[in-house]
Amino acid sequence: MRRSGLLVHEILTKMAQLAVEGITTFELELVAEKMMRDAGAKPAFKGYFSPAAGNRYPYVLCTSVNEEIVHGMPSPKRELKKGDIVSIDTGVQLDGYFGDSAVTVAIGEITPVLSKLMEVTKQSLELAIDKVRPGNRLFDICETVQKYVESNGFTIVREFVGHGIGTQLHEEPQIPNYVDRRGENPRLKEGMVLAIEPMVNVGKPASRVLADKWTAVTVDGSASAHFEHCVAVTADGPWVLTRP
Ligand code: MF3
Ligand code: CO
């Protein structure tokens, strides 16, 4: 999992460098797919079957621009513009083990609100990572993200969540970015790996899925940011597998 995590990190670092005004999200897709193949890895998303969508996801990246929350599809028609923010999310499988991570990148100069949205979302993930310790519980993670995001005036998407990860892309438990008392609250144990991925909106929390069956957008059209890391529970504390 460390090897797949580092490959995902390498790909996202390249994506963040390439994501400038004028590039299309499909150009990013092509570079990412080549990097995976060259490393002998399989894309985790391309071919992934979603019962909700009723079909297989066709790309190695999710590229979600502005009011798109997650699962935006790369397109040769989607040129990134100054002032956009784009979440780039990718996953790989190497020797049977998965890695999954996402970053949100600014294209040129962005408004102060968007810049705060990105900062708060990223920081909510960092604070949650610090809770990934044996003996803590899942809700410690959920509560940390929720409190930080809401106290900064932003809202949390409910319909999409983080997840356990290992020999499958999505394993138990589901990891909401808010405390959902209907859900399980397992104690964290050494050896578990959690993909934590806050999705945060400027406006209302409600989301809907476009006619393409994948792209999730905010109902009110406000911008959304997304960051994700895979974090292992170790006796020494959190080990972020998707960065050096
Ligand atoms: N990071 C997202 C997730 O873990 C992206 C999945 S896209 C999919 O759910 F195509 F694989 F579904
Ligand atoms: Co994920």
Image: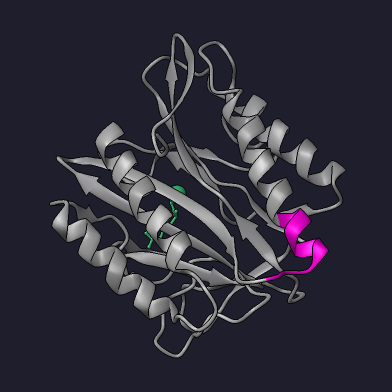
Side of 17 where 150 appears, left or right: right
Left or right of residue 3: residue 112: right
The residue depicted at 53 percent of the width and 16 percent of the height is: 133
For this view, does 185 lie left or right of residue 6?
Answer: right
Residue 202 in the image: above or below residue 58: above
Residue at x 75%, y 63% (from the top left corner):
114
Q: Which residues are magenta?
A: 109-117
Asked where in the image residue 223 lies, by quadrant, the reply is bottom right
**Residue 115, x across and y down, in percent:** 74, 59
Relative placement, left or right, of 110 versus 46 is right
Q: Is residue 111 magenta?
A: yes
Residue 219 or residue 24, whichever sits in front? 24
Q: How many marks?
A: 0
Quadrant (top left/top right/bottom left/bottom right) for the C terminus: top left
Query: Of helix, strand and loop, which mostly describes the magenta segment?
Result: helix
Q: Is residue 179 visible to us here? A: no
Q: Where is residue 226 shown, x and y percent of the image? A: 59, 55
Q: Position of residue 71 (x, y in %)?
A: 48, 67
Is residue 117 depicted above or below 76 in this figure?
A: above
User: Which of the pair 109/40 is nearer the observer?
Assistant: 109
Can see residue 68? Answer: yes
At a point 47% along the width and 72% down the height, the residue shown is 214
- For this rendering, which residue is in front, 47 or 241? 241
Q: How is the image coloured?
A: one colour
Q: Is residue 240 magenta?
A: no
Residue 54 percent location from the top left of the image: 36, 72
Residue at (55% x, 48% y) in the render = 161
Foreground: 154 or 105?
Answer: 105
> The N terminus lies in which quarter of the figure?
top left
